[in-house]
Image (cartoon, rainbow, N blue to C red):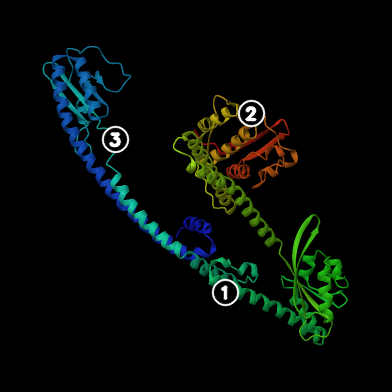
Amino acid sequence: MRPETQRVLRRLLRVLPSGERTFAVAGLALCGVVVLCSAAAIGVAYSQAAHAQQRSRSQETRLLGTLLAETATQQLQTGDLKRLRTTLSELQQSHGLGRITLELGNGQVIADTSPGRTLADSLPEDFGALPSSQVASIALDRFGVPDAVALQVADRGEAILRMETGERAGGPPIGPYIGVFGIVLAGVGVLAVVYRDFRLRLKALGAVGSALRSYAEGERSPEALRVCSQWGPEAQQWNSLVAEHEYTAHADQEQMVGAAIESEGAGNLAELASACDTLWTGLLLVGDEGVVRYANGAAAVLLGSLREDLPGTNIHDLLDDEALHEAVVNTASGKGLGRSTYEVERTRDEATTFLRIRVGSLANSTSGCALVTIEDITQKRVADDAMHSFVAQATHELRTPLTNIRLYIEEAIEATDDDVALRNKALNIINQESQRLERIVGDMLSVSEIEAGSIRLNHTDVRTEKLLEDLKNDYEASAEDKQIKLVFDLPPKLPVFSGDRDKVAIAMHNLLGNAIKYTPEKGQVTVKAEEDGGMLRIDFIDSGIGIDPSEHERVFEKFYRASDKRIDSIKGSGLGLALAREIVRLHGGDITLDSQVGKGSTFTLTLPAAMRAAA
């Protein structure tokens, strides 16, 4: 398989959850083969039908050429030039022919169905004889139809009639072929439905297999080995095994340290210290008075201290947690024999980290020490907080349109037959809210695709004038509803650039939509475009409420909305600006903001000159 194909396949599989990738490959390959073979067969059949139609068209042209030659000879004989030209034009239009020309032997063109050519008003007495090279240049198409006919006009000379076949518009009817391909796609859809029924089971088995491969490659982190427990009993049982393995690993560490402390000889302790320094988990030996006796390298890194400074330091000074300090002292003194776990938040140099602390006693030890293990769970906490925030925000944003749809459906149902206006109002609001719901979901999916790295840009030549013209048509009505003056200040000519037209249109829609949304009635919104220093620059200027300078960067974060109380009643998901900036940055440009509270905002979209297409 070619490297490019392998990269495309890997990107495609990366979109799927890890538990499904192994089992999805075979299904995708099978569906791909079925669809490709079906498309190839349909293509061959359609090509044969088009070939047969073209053959029939050529035979028809042969008959028309014969008829046209006889007619032209007769009218040349009589000298009726006007009628001859009319006849040629009517035959061309009625039979869908291409260009028809009639040239005399002396080289004078007396009839041409293509517009704009100046022709003689009368026929000469002597047409002249055709050159032999011109007669020899008459060619046959693949069906044996000549592209010209030599005419012999008695007592006047010779002429040559040239006629282009032309193409029959539409080609063979494509409906039956689409129907066959639809049946094939329906079969693939049935396979997808069957796959969906087994999806959870396949997810669990695939995720367990992926975890086993990670374990074989040396990954021992419990967070990396666990799978989603909602994927069925197999996933739950696997998570139980991972938890049991984690408990056993910590117990082994404690027993190893305890056995080394009980043993005699500095050599054993030196070997133990070297072994402990290879662990990614921080280890502390703490006495019954709460003073650290030993610390490995990982503990020093996680606590943000020098390793040589840790021995002799009280655990309370390192981790300011009274419950943890009490548990360590009690465990070391033998008053508490069980294992306990704590999560501690630490702030150092304006950076916050979260540590998971486990306290346990040393097995068969009389040295008066407790073993403290330390793990950094900051990334896991951040990931959990991000997921909870996303779910909470998404739930909130989706609830509003769904609630409005439900209320107005009930109002439309309760409306009587005489309340036509009330029912139409309810249906209009339901339509608006459903479109809003579709936009929210679309923005969420687009942002997720960008973050996952699975979004693809379909580069084409984009005409900036046409893009801005469509943008203006889409928002003129909403601007008029709010009595907002919408101005497009554009130069006579703007560059054509290469990019994904639909994605760039989404970014511009979000910027202009926000400008109109946050501008009060009778305000003004201006779209200004120019090419400045090799950059395509588009400014979206509004006379709206403005944004505080401290929030200029935060408004580009997902789900963030400015803290201004005036926008509480304005609907919005907080995804539009984040999506717009990510799309433009994928094109190599950027979106910047210049705004003052109460004076309005200017969002500037720029695309680099390197993205422009050649003329």
Q: Considering only vertical position in the picture, is 28 above or below 93?
A: below
Determine the CA span between mark 2 and mark 1. Answer: 61 Å
Q: Nearer the viewer, mark 2 or mark 3?
A: 2
Q: What is the crowding at mark 2: few (fewer than 14 residues within 10 Å), some, or many (at least 20)?
A: some
| x, y percent for residue 110 | 24, 18
Q: Which residue is mark 3?
A: 169
Q: Which residue is mark 2?
A: 521
SS assignment at label 1? helix
| x, y percent for residue 143 | 20, 39
- Determine whether, in the image, residue 149 is placed left or right of residue 385: left
Residue 533 visible in the current orientation: no
Determine the CA span between mark 1 and mark 3. Answer: 65 Å
SS assignment at label 3? loop
| x, y percent for residue 223 | 64, 67
Q: Amino acid at mark 3?
A: Ala
Q: Earlier in the sequence, mark 2 or mark 1?
A: 1
| x, y percent for residue 461 | 49, 37
Q: Amino acid at mark 2?
A: Glu
